[in-house]
Image (cartoon, rainbow, N blue to C red):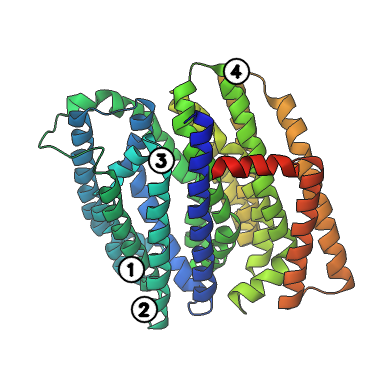
Amino acid sequence: MSNTQKAMNGGKWISISTAISTLFHFVQVAVLARVLAPSDFGIVSVSNLTIAFFQVFANLGFAYSIIYKQESDRNVLSTIYYLNLLVGFVIFIAIHFCSPFISAFYNEPKLTRILNLASYYFVIVYVGQIYMFLLEKELRFKSVAIIDITGSILSAIVTITLAYNGYHELSLIIGSLVSQATRSLLQIAFGIQFFVPKLYFNIHKINEHLRFGIYNMGDGFLGYIQSNADNIFLGGMLGVKMLGYYTIAYQLCVFPIIKLNPIILQVAYPILARMKENKAELRKSYLLILDFISYCNFPLLAGFFITADTVVPLLYGPGWEKSIELIQIFVFVSSFICLSHPLYTVAFSQGKPNLLFYLNLGTLIVKIPLVYLFGTYWGVTGIALAFLLATFLNMLVNFSMVNYLIGDFLGDFLKNIAKPVIFCLIMVGMISLYKMLVGYAGPVNAFAEIAIGGAIYAVLTLAYKLPLNQIKAYSQGLL
């Protein structure tokens, strides 16, 4: 099977997984928004921030180094496996120690219990994580998809059941832990054929992996700060209720992007790592990735922008109107993020994770003052606008780094992106006209707006971008 066929087959399974996982995520959030208060979402958001912070130090970039080096040495993999288990246990203890201080910072007593429970994530996740890296290295994306789908379904079922039985914010944490435990067991079941740990540990055996991971960990730390500075400041400055509104808006607009893009990037990285010496092919592949991402993400984001005032009351019920203006800002944040994502694939395929470190350092230096200044004067909306400006500047530097790694691409990129942008503007214009003439409240108007937008974008894409015969060729390649 050629690399193209492997990519298409992998894309098929990751697409199925992502579609199902995203559907269950939205169902879960829509149901919980009617059961839980904004402050409950805010408390869990702080817990997730803490977990994400410690994840930076736990991963050490081994996922990328194992794939980049095509690692198969059992001694090396055993050392990595036991090191991850050790780091996970240390982090588990560290969170228990830090939880009272974090709770005091946010002036929220419930946080201590939430964080102590959430810390079990680190005891669970590293039991099976290395097997996920190996499955991706071997392009076993069907197995990856099955694992992801099973975990997502169980998470939604457990979380919703517990929420309706009065567990409040604990329902989200317990549901997440059940999901991760299931994923770890399945990762072992599918990946054990590629690696069985032996009683061997020699830190010197993984020096190259550790060196590869130093910049990745530094990049991850800076990336965490610059990506979450808004949430950190918001919770401390305005309280967990405002953070709850912010979290709902973020999850609606940014969550689909961070779920859809890995469909391409997760499949692309192991393949690009194999063609790392061919700059012309890398540039061609990078442009194809950007093109595909644009056509997939832009109509979804444009739809969120123009239908937010219709969809939010239907999805989340009364009391969430504050999220509408935040959603319309996050649409543009997500647009810039989705265009920036492919750099990570290119940088790791070229063995240049240090560039990502420098990019996040620069973004961090810019973003923190912006968040503090805008948040002080304009509250939660100002923090969202600061996030938008920092993300735009990040994208500009991102493109300059890509130009350095693979050569000039900007002219071709601008020609490619013009069509999806124009298609989205036409789609937004037609939906706006419908809302002015007919109205926007209620499920009938919501369905009509979505149908109009989807039909317009589909017709324009078929007419000017992707003929039906080309779609048939793609579909045959996926079967």
Q: Secondary structure at mark 4?
A: helix
Relative to 50, is 443 on the left or the right? right
Q: CA distance from mark 3 to mark 4?
A: 32 Å
Residue at 11% from the left image edge and 33% from the top image edge = 200
What amino acid type is highlighted by mark number 2?
Answer: Tyr
Q: Nearer the viewer, residue 69 or 242?
A: 69
Q: Which mark is first along the chain, 2 or 4?
A: 2
* Residue under label 3: 221
Visible residue check, residue 351: yes
How far across and down, in percent of the image, does residue 263 sit?
52, 45
Identify whether 315 is placed above or below 221. Answer: below
Mark 1: give few (<14), some (14-19) or many (20+) Cα within 10 Å: many
Mark 4: give few (<14), some (14-19) or many (20+) Cα within 10 Å: few
What amino acid type is highlighted by mark number 1?
Answer: Ile
Instruction: Tell me the mark number nearer the camera, choosing from 1 and 4.
Output: 4
Q: Which mark is first along the chain, 1 or 3?
A: 1
